[in-house]
Image (cartoon, grey):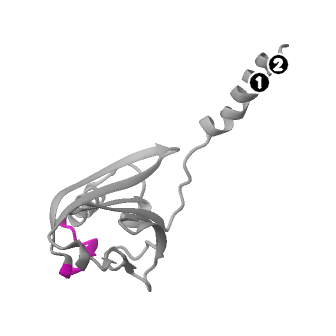
Amino acid sequence: MSADARWLLFLALAAIPVAAAEKAHLHGKAALDVAIEGSQLTLEFEAPLEDLVGFEREARNEKERAALIGLESYLKSGLAFVPSAAAGCKPAVATVATSSPGKGHFEVRATWKYECSDLVGLRSIEASIFTQYPKLKRIDVRAVTARGQSAARLTPSARSLKL
């Protein structure tokens, strides 16, 4: 076997675990991405459905359907994550979707876009979602702002993301 063929075989075999690997799905843990660009604040949230409504599959009855509708309504309301008032952020877009990344585990993904009149006044974002959904234990945050990239962890006892 030539050196080029061995190299191609090595690359192909090395890629198998990456292609077969499934994204980690941990209960009690969610993710929030924060991006500030121009006058726009964008928040992208992802969490296991179990942590928010108590199940992570298709709704099977009226109570479960009502829980999903309530979750969607709450997330679209913009009350889950509240930017500091001094920034003058007004909701522009809110989307909510559920998906199954594999093995029957369902997740919810929500995106909010805000137009802000004074991003200098954006000092924090309050994670009110912990009050509404107490099974949620932590949110890992990645932020990209004019000051650079940062990471943080929000919990029920530390709900305020300082920017």
* Residue identifier under label 2: 3
The image shows residue 134, relative to residue 29, as above or below, that is below
Q: Residue at x 23, y 64 (%)?
A: 70
In this view, 62 is above or below 84: above
Type of the residue with mark 1: Trp
Please report the bounds of the magenta region as a residue range.
77-86
Q: Residue at x 60, y 35 (%)?
A: 19
Q: Nearest the camera: 27 or 92?
A: 92
Residue 24 appears in view: yes
Residue 84 is tagged as: none
Is 105 above or below relative to 77?
A: above
Residue 7 tag number: 1
* SS assignment at label 1: helix
User: Mark 2: which secondary structure?
Assistant: helix
- Front position in the image: 101 or 154: 154
Name the kind of residue labelled 2 in the image. Answer: Ala
Relative to residue 75, is residue 142 drawn left or right? right
Neighbour tally class for label 1: few under 14, some 14-19, many 20 plus, Cα within 10 Å: few
List x then y, in percent, for residue 14. 72, 34
Q: Residue at x 23, y 72 (%)?
A: 119
Quadrant in the picture for residue 117: bottom left
Q: CA distance from mark 2 to mark 1?
A: 6 Å
Q: Quadrant of the N terminus?
A: top right
Image check: 12 left or right of 82? right
Evaluate if marks 2 and 1 touch, with contact meaning CB atoms under 8 Å apart. Answer: yes
